[in-house]
Amino acid sequence: MEDLKKELKVKIIEVLNLEDIELSEIGDQDALFGDGLGLDSIDALELIVLMDKDYGIKLSDPKEGREIFQSIETMAAYIAAHRTK
Amino acid sequence: MNTSTVYISHWCSIEAGEIKRNGEILFSKESEEIELNDLLKAYYREKNISYPKFFKMDTLSKLAFIGSEVLLENIELEKPNLDVGLVLSNSNSSLESDKNHCESISDKDNFYPSPAVFVYTLANICLAEISIRHTLQGENAFFISEKFDAETMWNYTQYMFETNRVNRVICGWVDYLDGGYKLVFYLVEKQGNKQHTIEELQNIFN
C-alpha cells in the first residue's frame, strides 16, 4: 500500500502539473480538494481519467468520486480493492 | 468612423528569447533557442509570481498570462474591474492544444482524452486566464487573422471607447505553434504618450 501511495503522488504531480509541489509535501491524509492541494474540477476529471487509464477503474457516479478523491489514502484504498490493471 | 482620442500608455513583447516592456529588455535568455515554456517559467520564477494555476495552462495561455503580467506591472487596477476590455488576436488560434487533443483521441484502443488539454482547445481561453488573474469583467474579443490586422484592432478598440464601455483596453497579438511564438501587448487608455493610431500599432507590432 505504501508503494501505491507513493506512485499516486508521483502520478498526480505529473498529470496535474503541480510543478511547485514536492512529493514530501503531500501527506497521505491531506485533502486533495479545497484547502488541501487546492485541486479544481478539471483536476477531478483528470483523476477520473487516471483511474481508468492506469488502473482500469471506471467511475461514473460523481458522488462516488467525492469519497474516493478525499485523500491519497482513500484513493489508494479504493484502487487496491478495485483495480483491474 | 470613430474619433475618440485615446493613447497607448504601455506596450510589451515576448519574442526570440526576449521579454521587453516599452522597448526596454526586461528579461532575456542567452540562447534564442530556449523553448518558450522554459522562458516563461524562468520569468515566472524570477518575478516570484505565486499562481499555481500557471503551470496547468497550455503554452498559449502561459504566454498570454506572462504578457499581461509584464504589461500591467506597476499598474493598479480596481478589483473587480468592469471598465477594462481585452482584445487579442493571433493566426494559429489554439492549434497547438487542438493537435494535442487530437493525438489523445486518435487511437481507439488508447482513447483517453485529457480534460486539462481539452479546455484549452479555444484560443479565447487565454482571455479568461488573464481576466481571472486580474479580476477583469469587461468586454472581450479574440480575432483570428493570418497576420496582425492593425486596422481591425484599431477599429474595434476605438469603438469600445466611443460607446463608453471601457476606460482601458488590453490589446495585442499572442501566437504560438510548433515552438514558434510572438506576443505583442499594448494598453490603450485615455492618457499616454503615443496616440492610438493604426500606424503606431504597426510600429509597435514590428
Image (spheres, helix red, strand yellow):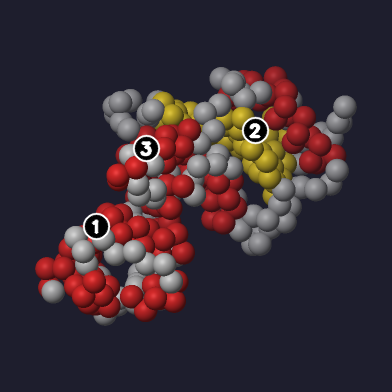
Task: Name the residue type under label 2.
Answer: Phe
Residue at the (34%, 64%) spot, across then down? A58
Q: Are marks 1 and 3 in contact (CB under 8 Å)?
A: no
Q: Are marks 1 and 2 in contact (CB under 8 Å)?
A: no
- Label 2 sits on a secondary structure element that is strand
Residue at the (44%, 65%) spot, across then down? A40
Residues tagged by mark 1 and mark 2 found on one chain of the structure: no
Give the label on residue B143, or none: 2
Image quarter for residue B17? Answer: top left
Q: Position of residue A56 (x, y in %)?
A: 26, 61
Quadrant of the image for the C terminus of chain B?
A: top right
- Labels 2 and 3: the sequence-earlier one: 3
Label 2 Cα neighbours within 10 Å, binned few <14 / some 14-19 / many ≥20: some
Residues tagged by mark 2 and mark 3 found on one chain of the structure: yes
Label 1 Cα neighbours within 10 Å, binned few <14 / some 14-19 / many ≥20: few
Whether residue A34 is visible: no
Q: Which residue is mark 3?
A: B106
Tell me: residue B153, above or below residue B128. Answer: above
Quadrant of the image for the N terminus of chain B?
A: top right
Side (left or right) of B79 relative to B197: left
Give the CA separation, mark 1 to mark 2. 39 Å
Residue at the (80%, 41%) spot, across then down? B161
Task: Name the residue type under label 1.
Answer: Asp
- Label 1 sits on a secondary structure element that is helix
Q: Which residue is mark 1?
A: A54
Which of these two is toward me, A81 or B88? A81
